[in-house]
Amino acid sequence: MAPRSAQKQKQLPEADSGERAEPRNPILERLLGDTGEPEHIVRAARSLGMRALPAIRESLNEQVSYPIEIELESVALARLADAKRPEAENDALVVASSATSPDALMLLADSQAIALLVSALFGGDPDMRVAPILRPLTMIELELASVVFEATAKALNGSGVRALSIRFPMPAAISGRDLKKLVIRDGPAVRMTFKLLAPSGEGQFIVMMPQRVLLLHRGDGSVEAEDKGDQQALWHARFSEEVMRSAVRLEATVPLGRLTLGDLSELFVGQVLEMPEAAPTQTTLSAHKKPLFTCEFGKLGQNFTVRITEPFDQGKDLIDGLMPR
C-alpha cells in the first residue's frame, strides 16, 4: 500500500500543474492584445473615439473663453499598469467604474493640458503661451480636470443598448501623492490619446480602457457595420455634393389664356402675341418638366423677372384647374 500512496502523491502535483493556467507572454500580449486580434481592438477603439470626439469638443468649448481644438492623436494597445507615469507628479487621473467593471475608464491629463484649460476657462490671453504647471496641482485645477474628464466619459459612454454604463458622478481627479499611492489593477488595455490645441499652447489627455470592456460593448462585430455605414454616408454626402453642383435648366411658364385649335394652327414664327390685361400674373418655375415654385411675373428695368412666392402645390394646382375661369 505504501508504494501506491507514494505514487498518488507524485501524481498530484502533475495534475495540479496541468490545471493551472500558464501565464501569458507579456511581450506577445502587448503585440496581439487579449484576443489575438489587435487590428479589431484598435479599430473598435478608434471608432469609439471618433464618434465621441464631436461631443467632447462641444462640451469643452461651451465652458472656455476661447476655442480649443481636440484631435484623436493615436490609438494603441497598452497595459492598465502603464496608465500613470511614475516620474510625473503633476498629472491628474481619475478611474471611472461601470456596471461591468470597477475600472472601465481611466482618464489622465498632463500638466500642460491642465495649464491650457485653466487659461481658457479663466479668460487668459489666447495669444500668450502658457507654461506647464510644475508645482503640485491645486484643488481648483483638479476640479477643472474632473469637469473635463466627466464630459469625456459621458461622450464615450454613449446611449442605448451599447452604452458603457459608466457610473456618474465620477470620483474626483487625483494627483501628486494620492496618484503615487494609487494601485492600478494590471491587464490588457487600449490607449486613446487626445491632443488639445490652441494658440496659447497644447497638451494631451489619455483614455485607457480594458480590452474586455471595449469588446463587451463595442466588439460584437457591429463596428464593421458602423464603419461601413459611415463609409456609405460619406459617399452619399459626396454624391449629394456633386449633384448640387450640377447645372439645371429652369423654365418659367407664363400663362397667356385660352386658344382654340384653329388659333393654334394659324400661329407663325415671329408673330407677337399680346398679353391681355386680365392675364394671370402667376408663373410656374420648373426644372426638367417638374414644377418647383409658383412665381409672380414682372419686369425690372429692361429685364423680365419672376419672383418666387411659394413652393409649388400640386393639390392646389389641380383644384385651380378644375375651377371654371
Image (spheres, grey):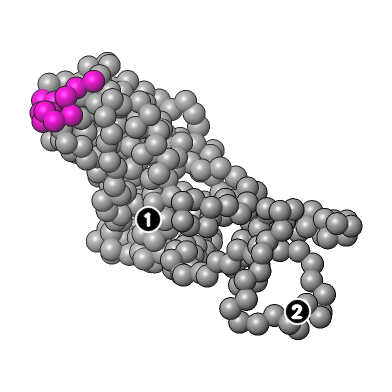
Could you classify mark 1 by the number of other residues whose Cα lies within 10 Å: few (under 14), some (14-19), or many (20 or more)? some
Q: Give the labeled residue for mark 1.
A: 46
Inspect this view and state whether residue 267 appears: yes
The span picked out in magenta is 123-134
Indicate the amino acid at tag 1: Arg
Residue 286, numbered circle: none
Image quarter hosting the C terminus: bottom right
Left/right placement of residue 123 relative to residue 265 reads left
Disc 2 on helix, strand or loop?
A: helix
Q: Is residue 247 magenta?
A: no
Residue visible at 83% across and 60% down?
A: 321
Residue visible at 35% across and 64% down?
A: 38
| Chief secondary structure of the magenta portion | loop
Mark closer to the chain start, 1 or 2 = 1
Indicate the amino acid at tag 2: Leu
Left/right placement of residue 162 relative to residue 277 reads left
* Relative to 154, residue 255 above or below: below
